[in-house]
Image (cartoon, rainbow, N blue to C red):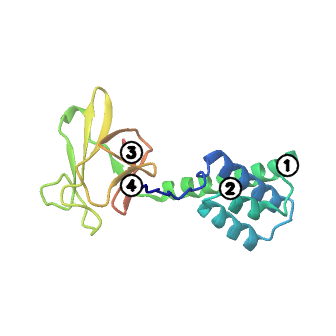
């Protein structure tokens, strides 16, 4: 007696290049005014969730496949302006942040930051860990090290994994508390 086994055949997974091409066609269609904002957003969501090439093809079937320079120029301009306003907002907020004075380099001691009363900089906020971070001077540079905090330490909006070199003017965050580093 012979038995045969049948295995289901699954279609090939979408490549990132296929998905990126479909997303670009959707962007170009929106830039040319062929898609409303709501339709564009919904199709983008469906494209990101698509699993098969035919699902992507259905999302872009009513749009021209070759967008053109004009739509790319429009999107590039919009992205540049949007990025500018975001950078401007961050710069404006950074100037309004309280200053955190860097310790004098001659002290040679690390500055511990946290809620614990033994910390050199005590921050009484629920998002700051007891012993949150440490600021030290190493080889002529300031180094900020996260000490396993729950809500993280950031430098200029990026989370610190381990330690990071910091400079005057950098924006540092401990949990939801933010400061701008200063030497005076």
Q: Residue furthest front?
A: 1
Structural distance between the alpha carbons of marks 3 and 4: 9 Å
Q: Which mark is residue 52?
A: none
Q: On the image, numbered disc 2 is attached to which residue?
A: 53
Residue at image location 61% in from the left, 51% down from the top: 14
Which mark identifies residue 182?
3
Q: Dot 4: within a 10 Å radius of its alpha carbon, few (fewer than 14), some, or many (20 or more) residues?
A: many
Disc 2, SS: helix
Q: Quadrant of the C terminus?
A: top left
Nearer mark to the viewer, of 2 and 3: 2
Which marked residue is nearer to the observer: mark 2 or mark 4?
A: 2
Indicate the position of residue 146 as horizontal and vertical percent values. Answer: 27, 48
Residue appearing at x 32%, y 36% in the figure = 142
Looking at marks 3 and 1 on the same chain, the residue that comes earlier in the sequence is marked by 1
Contact, mark 4 vs mark 1 (Cβ under 8 Å) = no
Q: Nearer the viewer, mark 3 or mark 4?
A: 4
Picture residue at 69% right of the left edge, 62% below the top = 55
* Crowd band around label 2 with a 10 angstrom C-alpha radius: few (<14), some (14–19), many (20+): some
Badge 1: residue crowd in 10 Å (few <14, some 14–19, many ≥20): few
What distance separates the C-alpha of mark 1 from that of mark 2?
A: 18 Å
Say whether disc 2 or disc 4 marks the residue closer to the N-terminus. Answer: 2
User: Viewer-nearest of labels 3 and 1?
Assistant: 1
Please give the residue where the numbered disc 1 appears in the rendered image. Answer: 66
Q: Nearer the viewer, residue 33 or 175?
A: 33
Residue bearing the label numbered 4: 179
x and y percent of residue 64 in the render?
87, 55
Residue 105 drawn above or below residue 112: above
Residue at 15% from the left image edge and 60% from the top image edge? 116
Vertical position of residue 122 compared to residue 138: above or below: below
- Report helix, strand or loop for mark 3: strand
């Amino acid at each position: 007696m012979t038995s045969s086994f049948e295995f289901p055949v699954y279609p090939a997974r979408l490549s990132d290049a296929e998905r990126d091409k479909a997303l670009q066609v959707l962007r170009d269609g929106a830039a040319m005014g062929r898609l409303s904002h709501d339709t564009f957003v919904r199709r983008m969501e469906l494209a990101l969730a698509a699993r098969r090439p035919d699902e992507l093809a259905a999302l872009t079937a009513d749009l021209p496949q070759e967008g053109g320079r004009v739509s790319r120029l429009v999107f590039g301009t919009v992205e540049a302006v949007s990025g500018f306003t975001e950078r401007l907002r961050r710069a404006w907020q950074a100037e309004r942040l309280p200053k955190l004075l860097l310790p004098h380099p001659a002290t040679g001691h690390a500055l511990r930051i946290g809620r614990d009363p033994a910390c050199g900089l005590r921050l009484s906020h629920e998002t700051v860990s007891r012993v949150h971070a440490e600021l030290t001077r190493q080889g002529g540079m300031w180094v900020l090290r996260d000490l396993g905090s729950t809500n993280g330490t950031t430098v200029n909006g990026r989370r610190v994994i381990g330690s990071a070199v910091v400079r005057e003017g950098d924006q540092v965050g401990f949990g939801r508390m933010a400061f701008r580093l200063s030497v005076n």
